[in-house]
């Protein structure tokens, strides 16, 4: 939108430069959405065999890999709701609304990708009609459905304020603590159940990953990822709106994420020792090297986020957070694809339609996030806040 | 934006939640006890006796690889009648040619193993794959959403997906549930000319398998594949050559769904515990916040 006009414009002030960057990023995302839409449509018309590289040997591919990663990233919403409403850490309140937006849009992206992945997308609602309470996937489907409703409620005050119903926004706010408790409960269930899902594959998942405590590992890493994305989302929202970033919010969440990484790694190491898997870890074969990748992406960020001298360095903290997010991505992809013992030595290399639709859906979520942060009240006005020069400049730029 | 909450309202909500906390804790403890009782009572215990499950005894030494079982299966299920080499959505059974030591051939009939504790049925989110009243693992394709989780859960690689259909579902051998309900042998057994396949209740066939092994002196290996595999399956194999060479998956004795089901059946207890823990934490933190006596926090909260 308006890219031609803008490219000729002189970006003189920082606010204008920011606007220009946002529009370029928005345009790029829109292009990805368009390509992904075409790929998704093609897949719907011609079917899975014609458009994907999936087979009976490897029936789940990057759609599922990104789904499970996105669910972990969307853990930002329940983690921040827990931090602010249940642990009552008001300091982190500015990071709440961006995180809740991340959650809602992340889950929406997951739902779209899951429908693309189904052999019968027209039967997506069947889990509501036909129950199998023993299936982890059944539990995940229900939790995601209910939690998406809860997230919509959590996001609604931002929209209601914008469209001129502050009274309704206030009423929802009165019920926010019970809503937050429901949100944390539903999230604890399905974040851990994603790990339970793999417990039905003892013959397929490599023993370094397969452990009866997979639900615990998936849950603790979801909290770690939630704090990570809570911090990164807050920083991104500040960058988009021009709001001055509070270092204690960003740094505090980052440090907590670092400690969670230590805890998560400690549980993993304990599990390996308990199950006698240390020799397998020290074999440095294909599987062992994959796991060492995960370990590196926990240890390096933990150092960057915890050691006081590094913690004060903004680029170091951001690098730590991004590495931590990368580590979770690797972990979820390892569980889904790389650390699976594929039957008959089968190989999977994703088809173009899979890549395009995946990035299209994720770009749509990112674009919606960008627009929401830009146009909704993502930072609540605070009574005790003394307007900083940066904020006033941003407000002035927005009004202009 | 919003005016501070009237103080009375804020207090009543807190009091309400604080009253809820012990109630929720109690409920959580109760439910976890209940589910524990449930488990020992055997919540997932099948309604059928494992000895009565319709089974097939497969004598590898008697199979000549003629493929009649495949043709008979295809005719029974209305599938295209060409003898494929691999299982597929239109091929419920195959006869695999295994090259064994000494340049010999052995033919191994493969189809759904009809587990007593089927992982596919445990994994299926919509119950499309399930055990009927006799313990036969059947596939209700009208429920299947095509999620393909069963393909990961099945340790034998049996369920096959209709990749070429824009609206594809999962298909597999349904153990001729209708035929066995009428007391008839499965179609593949009915088509076998050599007696390599025999139909009957699992308990009887297990006895017969061991009897054949004993009676033949040293001809057979003293092992019935399927007796204990993944908690027992109702396709029982006996062989005169080592099983390692036959391509049958080497699986352990514990049923695949034990790990996941032990977690999933605790879901209500976990949910209530988390909710109670959150409510309790909220009550404690809220009181601490109040004790700080900051008007400012009260204002900020809403």
Image: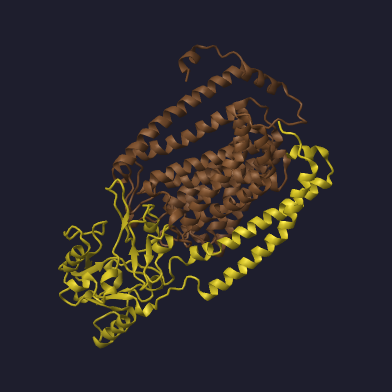
Chain colours: A brown, B yellow
Position in image of residue B187 (x %, y %)? 21, 70
Horizontal side, residue B37 vs residue B136: left or right: right
User: Residue at 71% of width from left, 48% of height from top?
Assistant: A87
Q: Position of residue B210 (x, y in %)?
A: 30, 84
Quadrant assignment, res B63: bottom left
Residue toward you, B296 or A196: B296
Question: In which quadrant of the rendered image does the C terminus of chain A lie?
Answer: top right
Report which quarter residue A94 is drawn in: top right
The image quadrant of residue B54 is bottom left
Residue B168: x and y in percent read 31, 50
In-image side of B225 versus A129 (left or right): left
- Looking at the rendered structure, the number of numbered marks drawn on it comes to 0
Q: Is residue B134 visible?
A: yes
Residue A5 spot, x, y in % from top left: 48, 13
Residue B131 horizontal side relative to residue A171, left or right = left
Of B278 and B252, the residue lying toward us:
B278
| Residue A209 in view | no
State whether residue B133 is above or below residue A388.
below
Residue B299 drawn above or below residue A189: above
Please report the residue visible at 26 percent of the width from the left and 59 percent of the height from the top. Answer: B87
Left or right of A55, for residue B25: right
State the residue at coordinates (61%, 18%).
Answer: A14
């Amino acid at each position: 939108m308006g890219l031609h006009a803008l490219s000729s414009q002189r970006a003189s002030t920082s606010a204008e430069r920011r606007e220009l960057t946002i529009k370029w990023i928005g345009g790029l995302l829109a292009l990805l959405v368009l390509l992904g839409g075409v790929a998704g449509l093609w897949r719907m018309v011609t079917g899975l065999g014609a458009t994907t590289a999936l087979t009976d040997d490897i029936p789940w591919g990057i759609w599922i890999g990104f789904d499970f990663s996105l669910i972990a990233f969307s853990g930002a919403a329940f983690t921040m709701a827990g931090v602010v409403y249940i642990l009552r850490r008001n300091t982190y309140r500015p990071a709440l609304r961006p995180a809740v937006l991340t959650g809602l849009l992340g889950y929406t992206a997951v739902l779209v990708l899951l429908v693309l992945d189904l052999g019968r997308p027209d039967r997506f609602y069947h889990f509501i009609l036909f129950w199998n309470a023993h299936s982890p996937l059944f539990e995940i489907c229900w939790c995601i459905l209910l939690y998406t409703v809860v997230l919509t409620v959590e996001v609604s005050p931002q929209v209601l304020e914008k469209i001129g119903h502050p009274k309704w926004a206030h009423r929802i706010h009165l019920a926010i603590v019970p809503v937050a408790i429901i949100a944390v409960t539903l999230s604890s269930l399905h974040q851990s159940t994603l790990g339970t899902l793999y417990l039905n594959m003892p013959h397929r998942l490599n023993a370094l990953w397969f452990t009866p405590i997979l639900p615990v590992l998936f849950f603790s890493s979801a909290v770690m990822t939630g704090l990570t994305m809570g911090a990164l989302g807050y920083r991104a929202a500040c960058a988009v709106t021009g709001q001055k970033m509070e270092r204690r919010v960003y740094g505090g969440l980052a440090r907590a994420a670092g400690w969670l990484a230590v805890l998560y790694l400690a549980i993993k190491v304990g599990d390996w020792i308990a199950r006698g898997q240390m020799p397998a870890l020290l074999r440095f074969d294909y599987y062992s090297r994959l796991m060492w990748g995960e370990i590196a992406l926990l240890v390096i960020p933990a150092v960057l986020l915890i050691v006081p001298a590094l913690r004060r360095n903004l680029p170091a903290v951001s690098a730590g957070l991004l590495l931590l997010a990368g580590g979770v991505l690797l972990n979820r992809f390892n569980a889904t694809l790389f650390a699976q013992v594929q039957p008959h030595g089968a190989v999977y290399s994703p088809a173009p339609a899979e890549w395009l639709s995946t990035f299209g859906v994720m770009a749509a979520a990112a674009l919606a996030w960008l627009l929401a942060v830009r146009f909704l009240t993502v930072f609540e006005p605070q009574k005790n806040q003394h307007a900083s020069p940066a904020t006033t400049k941003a407000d002035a730029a927005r009004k202009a | 934006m919003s005016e501070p909450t009237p103080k009375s309202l804020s207090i009543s909500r807190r009091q309400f939640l604080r009253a809820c906390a012990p109630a929720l804790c109690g409920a959580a403890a109760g439910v976890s006890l209940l589910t524990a009782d449930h488990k020992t009572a055997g919540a997932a215990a099948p309604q059928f006796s494992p000895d009565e499950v319709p089974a097939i005894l497969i004598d590898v030494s008697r199979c000549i690889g003629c493929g009649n079982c495949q043709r008979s299966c295809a005719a029974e299920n209305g599938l295209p009648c060409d003898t494929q080499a691999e299982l597929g959505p239109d091929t419920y059974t195959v006869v695999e040619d295994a090259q064994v030591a000494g340049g010999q051939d052995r033919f191994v009939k493969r189809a759904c193993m009809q587990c007593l504790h089927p992982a596919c049925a445990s994994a299926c989110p919509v119950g499309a794959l399930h055990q009927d009243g006799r313990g036969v693992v059947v596939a209700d394709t009208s429920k299947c959403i095509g999620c393909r989780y069963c393909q990961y859960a099945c340790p034998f690689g049996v369920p096959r997906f209709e990749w070429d259909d824009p609206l594809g579902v999962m298909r597999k051998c349904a153990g001729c549930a209708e035929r066995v309900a009428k007391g008839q042998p499965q179609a593949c057994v009915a088509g076998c000319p050599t007696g390599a396949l025999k139909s009957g209740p699992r308990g009887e066939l297990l006895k017969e398998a061991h009897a054949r092994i004993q009676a033949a002196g040293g001809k057979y290996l003293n092992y019935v594949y399927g007796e204990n595999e993944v908690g027992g399956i109702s396709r029982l194999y006996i062989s005169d050559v080592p099983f390692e060479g036959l391509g049958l998956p080497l699986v352990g004795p514990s049923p695949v769904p034990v790990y996941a089901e032990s977690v999933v059946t605790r879901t209500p207890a976990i949910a209530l515990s988390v909710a109670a823990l959150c409510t309790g934490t909220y009550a404690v933190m809220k009181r601490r916040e109040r004790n700080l006596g900051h008007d400012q926090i009260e204002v900020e909260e809403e």
